[in-house]
Image: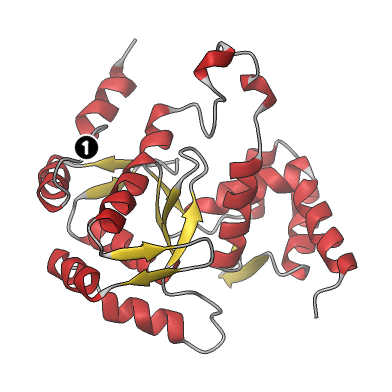
Amino acid sequence: MVSIASIAQTASLIGDLARASMLTALMDGRALTATELSRVAGIAPQTASGHLTRLVEAGLLVMERQGRHRYHRLASPAVAHMIESIMSLSVDPDTQGARPRSAGPVTGPRDKALRYARTCYDHLAGQLAVDMTDHLVASGCVELSGDGGLLTDAGDRFLRSLGVDVDSAHHRASGRGTGRMFCRPCLDWSARRFHIGGALGAAICQCYLDQGWIRLAAGTRAVTVTPQGQRAIREAFPLMEVGLSETAHADKRNRP
């Protein structure tokens, strides 16, 4: 049973700047060592180890041994969802006053690539994911509410036609002890609108990766859309704008 004390304890763990930095660094689904996470948080490896032990004991992280190395990753998609939800409610003080009030609040990451497409643990987030979700909802393929999501028969046929392994998503959601929803709305950190999470969101992301439509950018949560992906997405989602291709990323990296 969840107690008020346990809620406060979890909140205090996440509220520490170093621990928040390390948790955020693991949002792309990778497993990292204490040394790697210490660099992210700007603290000594020994200090990081103490923080990581507390996060593991609280069930927010899991630690896996491989040879002499110890790797840490988020304990579950539920933890990633909690962190993304906190991000969506947070305001970066550095952005205050950056724009005139009439422009509205600045939300999410400043980096254009991250705002457009990134991973949220094991599913897609950013404007690309939000636009795809809007299309699926408008076409009657998916129904979303604040409490959950439903894949309709039309949506099942459509996603299978793209190559999405819907059966695998159902299996992951029904697995004993996973506690994972098949389809759920995930409030996007930058767009502040819903994208698709849960096992279905993970299956969609994996499909796009397997087919070469998108690629994970090294050292970041950003996702690039390949030329093949641009063509395929435009065909599958008519009238949807697709931007920030690999060429755009390359131009940005090479810009003086």
The percent position of residue 117, horizontal first and vertical second, equals 36, 41
At mark 1, the secondary structure is loop
Which residue appears farthest toward the bottom when viewing the image? 176
Q: Who's the residue at 32% across and 64% down the image?
A: 142
Q: Which quarter of the rendered picture does the N terminus lie within?
A: bottom right
Q: Residue at x 57, y 50 (%)?
A: 84
Q: In this rendering, would 2 be left or right of 99?
A: right
Q: Tally the marks.
A: 1
Q: Judge by depth and name the residue closer to the eye, 165 or 224.
A: 165
Residue at (80%, 48%) from the top-left corner?
47
Q: Nearer the viewer, residue 195 or 203?
A: 195
Whether 170 is drawn above or below 254: the answer is below
Which residue carries the number 1 mark? 242
Give the percent coordinates (x, y) of residue 178. 53, 80
- In the rendered view, tell whether residue 19 sits above or below residue 160: above
* Number of residues whose C-alpha sits closer than 10 Å to that of mark 1, classed few (under 14), some (14–19) or many (20 or more): some
Regarding residue 181, the answer to whether it shows in the image is yes
Decide if residue 105 is on the left or right side of residue 233: right
Residue 37 left/right relative to 188: right
Q: Tell me the residue at 37%/71% (across/down).
A: 150
Left or right: 68 as drawn, with respect to 220:
right
**Residue 198 sits in quarter:** bottom left
Q: Where residue 32 appears, x then y in whole percent? A: 57, 55
Query: On the rendered image, what quadrant is the C terminus found in?
Result: top left
Q: Position of residue 212 (x, y in %)?
A: 18, 53
Q: Amino acid at mark 1?
A: Val
Q: Is residue 70 visible?
A: no
